[in-house]
Image (cartoon, helix red, strand yellow):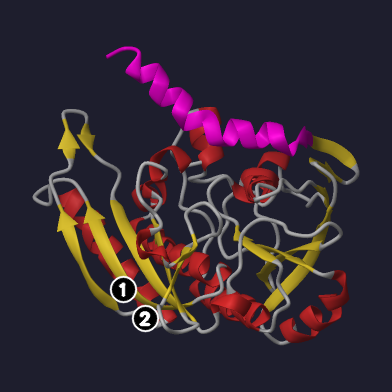
Amino acid sequence: SKRWVYEQYDTTVRTNTVVGPGDADAAVIRIKGTNRGLVAKTDCNGRYVYLNPRKGAQIAVAESARNVVCSGGLPVAVTNCLNFGNPYKPEVYWVFKEAVEGMGDACLALHTPVTGGNVSFYNENPDGAVFPTPTIGMLGLIDNIDEHTTRSAFKNEGDEIILLSPESWTAKNDIDGSEYLSHVHGRTAGDAPHFDMDEEVSLQKACLNLIRKGLVESAHDVSDGGLAVCLAESCFGTEDRGAVFDLPSVAGVRTDALLFGEAQSRIVISVNPANRTEVEERLAGSGVQMTTIGIVSGIRMKLTIDGISAVDLAVSEMRHTFENAIPAIMNRHSDRV
Protein backbone atom coordinates (compact mmCIF):
# COMPACT_ATOMS: atom_id res chain seq x y z
CA SER A 1 0.00 0.00 0.00
CA LYS A 2 1.15 3.56 -0.81
CA ARG A 3 -0.76 4.87 2.23
CA TRP A 4 2.50 5.95 3.91
CA VAL A 5 3.05 8.35 0.99
CA TYR A 6 -0.38 9.83 0.37
CA GLU A 7 -1.27 10.31 4.03
CA GLN A 8 1.48 12.95 4.17
CA TYR A 9 -0.51 15.17 1.79
CA ASP A 10 -3.86 16.93 2.00
CA THR A 11 -6.39 14.95 -0.03
CA THR A 12 -9.50 16.89 1.04
CA VAL A 13 -8.83 20.32 -0.43
CA ARG A 14 -12.01 22.45 -0.49
CA THR A 15 -13.99 19.47 0.87
CA ASN A 16 -14.86 18.19 -2.60
CA THR A 17 -13.22 14.77 -2.28
CA VAL A 18 -15.80 12.02 -2.82
CA VAL A 19 -13.36 9.09 -2.92
CA GLY A 20 -9.82 9.57 -1.68
CA PRO A 21 -6.67 7.58 -2.43
CA GLY A 22 -6.79 3.92 -1.52
CA ASP A 23 -10.59 3.62 -1.42
CA ALA A 24 -11.12 2.92 -5.12
CA ASP A 25 -9.11 2.32 -8.27
CA ALA A 26 -9.11 6.10 -8.87
CA ALA A 27 -9.87 9.27 -6.91
CA VAL A 28 -13.20 11.07 -7.37
CA ILE A 29 -13.67 14.82 -6.89
CA ARG A 30 -17.07 16.55 -6.83
CA ILE A 31 -17.70 19.34 -9.34
CA LYS A 32 -19.23 21.89 -7.00
CA GLY A 33 -22.79 22.91 -7.74
CA THR A 34 -23.47 19.77 -9.79
CA ASN A 35 -23.92 16.05 -9.23
CA ARG A 36 -21.02 15.30 -11.56
CA GLY A 37 -17.50 14.30 -10.61
CA LEU A 38 -13.95 14.25 -11.94
CA VAL A 39 -12.05 10.98 -11.75
CA ALA A 40 -8.24 10.93 -11.78
CA LYS A 41 -5.60 8.21 -11.79
CA THR A 42 -1.89 7.96 -12.60
CA ASP A 43 -0.31 4.71 -13.77
CA CYS A 44 2.83 3.22 -15.25
CA ASN A 45 4.79 0.01 -14.79
CA GLY A 46 8.40 0.67 -15.78
CA ARG A 47 9.16 -3.05 -15.96
CA TYR A 48 6.65 -3.50 -18.76
CA VAL A 49 8.08 -0.59 -20.76
CA TYR A 50 11.63 -1.85 -20.24
CA LEU A 51 10.68 -5.28 -21.59
CA ASN A 52 8.47 -4.05 -24.45
CA PRO A 53 8.38 -0.25 -24.85
CA ARG A 54 5.43 -0.04 -27.23
CA LYS A 55 3.21 -2.55 -25.44
CA GLY A 56 4.29 -1.33 -22.00
CA ALA A 57 3.21 2.24 -22.83
CA GLN A 58 -0.08 0.98 -24.25
CA ILE A 59 -0.69 -0.86 -20.99
CA ALA A 60 0.06 2.29 -18.97
CA VAL A 61 -2.66 4.19 -20.84
CA ALA A 62 -5.08 1.26 -20.76
CA GLU A 63 -4.63 0.57 -17.05
CA SER A 64 -5.14 4.19 -16.05
CA ALA A 65 -8.34 4.25 -18.13
CA ARG A 66 -9.42 0.89 -16.65
CA ASN A 67 -8.97 2.32 -13.15
CA VAL A 68 -11.16 5.30 -14.04
CA VAL A 69 -13.83 2.93 -15.39
CA CYS A 70 -13.70 0.76 -12.25
CA SER A 71 -14.45 3.89 -10.23
CA GLY A 72 -17.49 4.68 -12.37
CA GLY A 73 -16.00 7.24 -14.75
CA LEU A 74 -15.70 7.63 -18.51
CA PRO A 75 -12.06 8.27 -19.53
CA VAL A 76 -11.84 11.53 -21.50
CA ALA A 77 -8.25 12.85 -21.58
CA VAL A 78 -4.62 12.14 -20.74
CA THR A 79 -1.61 14.00 -19.45
CA ASN A 80 1.82 12.45 -19.08
CA CYS A 81 5.26 12.65 -17.50
CA LEU A 82 7.84 10.81 -19.62
CA ASN A 83 11.00 9.78 -17.77
CA PHE A 84 13.89 8.29 -19.73
CA GLY A 85 17.66 8.10 -19.85
CA ASN A 86 20.11 9.84 -22.19
CA PRO A 87 18.40 10.26 -25.62
CA TYR A 88 21.79 10.47 -27.36
CA LYS A 89 22.22 6.78 -26.66
CA PRO A 90 20.56 5.01 -29.62
CA GLU A 91 18.91 2.31 -27.51
CA VAL A 92 17.37 4.91 -25.16
CA TYR A 93 16.09 6.99 -28.07
CA TRP A 94 14.55 3.89 -29.68
CA VAL A 95 12.79 2.97 -26.42
CA PHE A 96 11.48 6.55 -26.16
CA LYS A 97 10.18 6.50 -29.74
CA GLU A 98 8.45 3.14 -29.26
CA ALA A 99 6.88 4.21 -25.97
CA VAL A 100 5.52 7.47 -27.41
CA GLU A 101 4.05 5.63 -30.39
CA GLY A 102 2.52 2.99 -28.12
CA MET A 103 1.00 5.70 -25.95
CA GLY A 104 -0.44 7.33 -29.06
CA ASP A 105 -1.93 4.04 -30.28
CA ALA A 106 -3.73 3.52 -26.97
CA CYS A 107 -4.97 7.10 -26.74
CA LEU A 108 -6.48 6.82 -30.22
CA ALA A 109 -8.18 3.52 -29.38
CA LEU A 110 -9.63 4.87 -26.12
CA HIS A 111 -10.52 8.32 -27.53
CA THR A 112 -8.47 10.08 -24.85
CA PRO A 113 -6.52 13.02 -26.33
CA VAL A 114 -3.26 14.12 -24.72
CA THR A 115 -3.84 17.57 -23.22
CA GLY A 116 -0.22 18.17 -22.22
CA GLY A 117 2.70 16.72 -20.35
CA ASN A 118 6.44 16.90 -19.95
CA VAL A 119 9.57 14.94 -20.83
CA SER A 120 12.49 14.31 -18.48
CA PHE A 121 15.68 12.88 -20.01
CA TYR A 122 19.09 11.99 -18.56
CA ASN A 123 17.63 10.06 -15.61
CA GLU A 124 20.73 7.94 -15.08
CA ASN A 125 23.34 6.98 -12.55
CA PRO A 126 26.68 5.19 -13.01
CA ASP A 127 24.83 1.86 -13.21
CA GLY A 128 22.68 3.00 -16.14
CA ALA A 129 19.34 4.57 -16.95
CA VAL A 130 16.15 4.27 -14.91
CA PHE A 131 13.46 1.98 -16.24
CA PRO A 132 11.67 3.92 -19.00
CA THR A 133 8.63 5.36 -17.24
CA PRO A 134 5.94 7.12 -19.31
CA THR A 135 3.64 7.94 -16.39
CA ILE A 136 0.06 8.48 -17.49
CA GLY A 137 -2.45 10.73 -15.75
CA MET A 138 -5.98 9.81 -16.86
CA LEU A 139 -8.96 12.12 -16.38
CA GLY A 140 -12.53 10.84 -16.38
CA LEU A 141 -16.05 12.11 -15.78
CA ILE A 142 -18.91 10.68 -13.70
CA ASP A 143 -22.38 11.98 -14.56
CA ASN A 144 -23.92 11.00 -11.22
CA ILE A 145 -21.56 10.66 -8.27
CA ASP A 146 -24.33 9.41 -5.95
CA GLU A 147 -25.30 6.49 -8.16
CA HIS A 148 -22.22 5.61 -10.20
CA THR A 149 -19.21 6.09 -7.91
CA THR A 150 -17.79 2.60 -7.33
CA ARG A 151 -15.21 1.49 -4.79
CA SER A 152 -12.75 -1.36 -5.07
CA ALA A 153 -13.59 -3.25 -1.85
CA PHE A 154 -16.27 -5.90 -1.42
CA LYS A 155 -19.35 -4.40 0.28
CA ASN A 156 -21.99 -6.93 1.19
CA GLU A 157 -21.99 -10.39 2.73
CA GLY A 158 -23.28 -12.90 0.18
CA ASP A 159 -22.44 -10.91 -2.95
CA GLU A 160 -21.17 -12.98 -5.86
CA ILE A 161 -17.61 -12.31 -7.04
CA ILE A 162 -17.21 -12.34 -10.80
CA LEU A 163 -14.17 -12.09 -13.06
CA LEU A 164 -14.77 -10.09 -16.24
CA SER A 165 -12.39 -10.99 -19.07
CA PRO A 166 -12.29 -10.99 -22.88
CA GLU A 167 -14.65 -13.51 -24.46
CA SER A 168 -11.85 -15.66 -25.85
CA TRP A 169 -9.63 -15.25 -22.79
CA THR A 170 -8.12 -18.17 -20.91
CA ALA A 171 -5.49 -18.12 -18.16
CA LYS A 172 -1.97 -17.61 -19.49
CA ASN A 173 1.06 -19.66 -18.48
CA ASP A 174 2.90 -16.38 -18.20
CA ILE A 175 4.67 -14.54 -15.36
CA ASP A 176 6.62 -12.24 -17.71
CA GLY A 177 7.30 -8.81 -16.24
CA SER A 178 5.33 -9.59 -13.10
CA GLU A 179 5.82 -8.35 -9.56
CA TYR A 180 6.02 -12.01 -8.54
CA LEU A 181 8.92 -12.69 -10.92
CA SER A 182 10.71 -9.54 -9.73
CA HIS A 183 10.12 -9.86 -5.98
CA VAL A 184 10.24 -13.62 -5.45
CA HIS A 185 12.78 -14.60 -8.10
CA GLY A 186 14.73 -11.34 -8.42
CA ARG A 187 14.33 -11.16 -12.19
CA THR A 188 12.91 -8.73 -14.72
CA ALA A 189 12.67 -10.83 -17.84
CA GLY A 190 10.56 -11.95 -20.77
CA ASP A 191 7.96 -9.82 -22.50
CA ALA A 192 5.41 -7.42 -21.09
CA PRO A 193 2.22 -9.27 -20.04
CA HIS A 194 -0.46 -10.33 -22.50
CA PHE A 195 -2.38 -7.33 -23.84
CA ASP A 196 -4.78 -6.75 -26.72
CA MET A 197 -6.16 -3.26 -27.33
CA ASP A 198 -9.47 -4.39 -28.84
CA GLU A 199 -10.10 -6.68 -25.86
CA GLU A 200 -9.36 -3.78 -23.52
CA VAL A 201 -11.81 -1.43 -25.22
CA SER A 202 -14.59 -4.05 -25.06
CA LEU A 203 -13.90 -4.77 -21.38
CA GLN A 204 -14.01 -1.11 -20.35
CA LYS A 205 -17.24 -0.44 -22.26
CA ALA A 206 -18.94 -3.49 -20.76
CA CYS A 207 -17.87 -2.75 -17.19
CA LEU A 208 -18.90 0.91 -17.36
CA ASN A 209 -22.28 -0.10 -18.76
CA LEU A 210 -22.86 -2.46 -15.80
CA ILE A 211 -21.86 0.26 -13.33
CA ARG A 212 -24.17 2.84 -14.92
CA LYS A 213 -27.06 0.37 -14.69
CA GLY A 214 -26.46 0.02 -10.94
CA LEU A 215 -25.48 -3.64 -11.15
CA VAL A 216 -21.97 -3.47 -9.65
CA GLU A 217 -21.24 -3.32 -5.91
CA SER A 218 -17.43 -3.12 -6.28
CA ALA A 219 -14.86 -3.19 -9.08
CA HIS A 220 -11.09 -3.68 -9.01
CA ASP A 221 -8.78 -4.33 -11.94
CA VAL A 222 -6.22 -7.12 -12.12
CA SER A 223 -2.77 -5.54 -12.42
CA ASP A 224 0.37 -5.59 -10.22
CA GLY A 225 0.55 -8.93 -8.42
CA GLY A 226 -2.03 -10.63 -10.62
CA LEU A 227 -5.37 -12.15 -9.69
CA ALA A 228 -4.40 -13.26 -6.17
CA VAL A 229 -3.32 -9.76 -5.13
CA CYS A 230 -6.42 -8.23 -6.73
CA LEU A 231 -8.66 -10.55 -4.71
CA ALA A 232 -6.79 -9.80 -1.48
CA GLU A 233 -6.95 -6.03 -2.03
CA SER A 234 -10.70 -6.31 -2.68
CA CYS A 235 -11.12 -7.54 0.90
CA PHE A 236 -9.66 -4.29 2.33
CA GLY A 237 -12.56 -1.88 2.73
CA THR A 238 -13.91 0.39 5.45
CA GLU A 239 -14.86 -2.92 7.01
CA ASP A 240 -12.70 -5.92 6.21
CA ARG A 241 -14.72 -8.42 4.18
CA GLY A 242 -13.62 -12.01 3.80
CA ALA A 243 -14.31 -14.11 0.74
CA VAL A 244 -14.31 -17.72 -0.38
CA PHE A 245 -12.84 -18.37 -3.83
CA ASP A 246 -12.58 -21.55 -5.87
CA LEU A 247 -10.52 -21.33 -9.04
CA PRO A 248 -10.31 -24.14 -11.59
CA SER A 249 -6.86 -25.27 -12.67
CA VAL A 250 -6.07 -24.76 -16.35
CA ALA A 251 -4.23 -27.38 -18.37
CA GLY A 252 -0.69 -26.24 -19.12
CA VAL A 253 -0.84 -23.28 -16.71
CA ARG A 254 1.30 -23.37 -13.58
CA THR A 255 -0.23 -22.40 -10.26
CA ASP A 256 2.05 -19.37 -9.84
CA ALA A 257 1.06 -18.11 -13.29
CA LEU A 258 -2.63 -18.62 -12.52
CA LEU A 259 -2.38 -16.63 -9.28
CA PHE A 260 0.30 -14.03 -10.02
CA GLY A 261 0.45 -13.63 -13.80
CA GLU A 262 -0.39 -10.08 -14.86
CA ALA A 263 -2.22 -10.60 -18.16
CA GLN A 264 -4.23 -7.44 -18.79
CA SER A 265 -7.90 -6.66 -19.48
CA ARG A 266 -9.43 -8.30 -16.40
CA ILE A 267 -11.69 -6.79 -13.74
CA VAL A 268 -13.07 -8.38 -10.58
CA ILE A 269 -16.56 -7.18 -9.69
CA SER A 270 -19.00 -8.11 -6.94
CA VAL A 271 -22.74 -8.18 -7.60
CA ASN A 272 -25.93 -8.81 -5.68
CA PRO A 273 -27.05 -12.38 -6.55
CA ALA A 274 -30.46 -10.96 -7.51
CA ASN A 275 -28.76 -9.02 -10.33
CA ARG A 276 -26.73 -11.89 -11.76
CA THR A 277 -29.17 -12.68 -14.58
CA GLU A 278 -29.29 -9.07 -15.74
CA VAL A 279 -25.48 -8.90 -15.67
CA GLU A 280 -25.36 -11.97 -17.93
CA GLU A 281 -27.91 -10.47 -20.29
CA ARG A 282 -26.08 -7.16 -20.57
CA LEU A 283 -22.75 -8.88 -21.27
CA ALA A 284 -24.22 -10.94 -24.10
CA GLY A 285 -22.67 -9.80 -27.37
CA SER A 286 -20.25 -7.43 -25.63
CA GLY A 287 -17.13 -9.50 -26.27
CA VAL A 288 -16.72 -9.95 -22.52
CA GLN A 289 -17.29 -13.11 -20.50
CA MET A 290 -18.13 -13.49 -16.82
CA THR A 291 -16.80 -16.22 -14.55
CA THR A 292 -18.12 -16.61 -11.02
CA ILE A 293 -15.09 -17.25 -8.81
CA GLY A 294 -16.34 -16.71 -5.27
CA ILE A 295 -18.65 -15.20 -2.70
CA VAL A 296 -18.19 -12.47 -0.08
CA SER A 297 -18.22 -14.26 3.27
CA GLY A 298 -16.74 -14.00 6.76
CA ILE A 299 -13.47 -12.34 7.78
CA ARG A 300 -10.93 -14.64 6.13
CA MET A 301 -9.73 -14.97 2.56
CA LYS A 302 -10.01 -18.61 1.56
CA LEU A 303 -8.86 -19.63 -1.91
CA THR A 304 -8.85 -23.12 -3.33
CA ILE A 305 -7.75 -24.45 -6.71
CA ASP A 306 -9.82 -27.46 -7.77
CA GLY A 307 -10.94 -27.70 -4.15
CA ILE A 308 -7.38 -27.80 -2.75
CA SER A 309 -6.54 -25.00 -0.31
CA ALA A 310 -3.99 -22.45 -1.53
CA VAL A 311 -4.75 -19.49 0.77
CA ASP A 312 -6.50 -19.31 4.15
CA LEU A 313 -5.64 -16.08 5.96
CA ALA A 314 -7.39 -13.57 8.20
CA VAL A 315 -8.11 -10.40 6.25
CA SER A 316 -6.88 -8.33 9.20
CA GLU A 317 -3.47 -10.04 9.04
CA MET A 318 -3.18 -9.51 5.29
CA ARG A 319 -4.17 -5.88 5.63
CA HIS A 320 -1.62 -5.26 8.39
CA THR A 321 1.17 -6.64 6.19
CA PHE A 322 -0.09 -4.76 3.14
CA GLU A 323 -0.30 -1.37 4.84
CA ASN A 324 2.86 -1.60 6.95
CA ALA A 325 5.39 -2.84 4.39
CA ILE A 326 6.55 0.61 3.23
CA PRO A 327 6.61 2.15 6.75
CA ALA A 328 8.75 -0.78 7.94
CA ILE A 329 11.21 -0.30 5.08
CA MET A 330 11.38 3.47 5.57
CA ASN A 331 11.90 3.11 9.32
CA ARG A 332 14.67 0.60 8.72
CA HIS A 333 16.45 2.99 6.36
CA SER A 334 15.93 6.02 8.62
CA ASP A 335 17.72 4.18 11.42
CA ARG A 336 20.84 4.12 9.24
CA VAL A 337 20.93 7.89 8.69
Which disc is residue 104 wearing?
1
Please tell me how crowded label 2 is: few (under 14), some (14-19), or many (20+) other residues with Cα within 10 Å.
Answer: few
Magenta region, residue range? 312-337
* Relative side of 139 to 218, left or right: left
Q: Amino acid at mark 2?
A: Leu
* Relative side of 324 to 80, left or right: right
Kindly indicate whether the residue at mark 2 contacts the one at mark 1 (C-beta within 8 angstroms).
yes
What's the CA distance linking mark 1 and mark 2?
Answer: 6 Å
Dot 2 corresponds to which residue?
108
Question: In terms of depth relative to the viewer, which is nearer, 62 or 143?
Answer: 143
Q: Is residue 187 magenta?
A: no
- Secondary structure that dominates the magenta span: helix
Which disc is residue 129 wearing?
none
* Relative side of 112 to 255, left or right: left
Q: Position of residue 40 (x, y in %)?
A: 41, 66
Q: Amino acid at mark 1?
A: Gly
Q: Position of residue 58 (x, y in %)?
A: 40, 65
Per the image, label 1 sits on a secondary structure element best described as helix
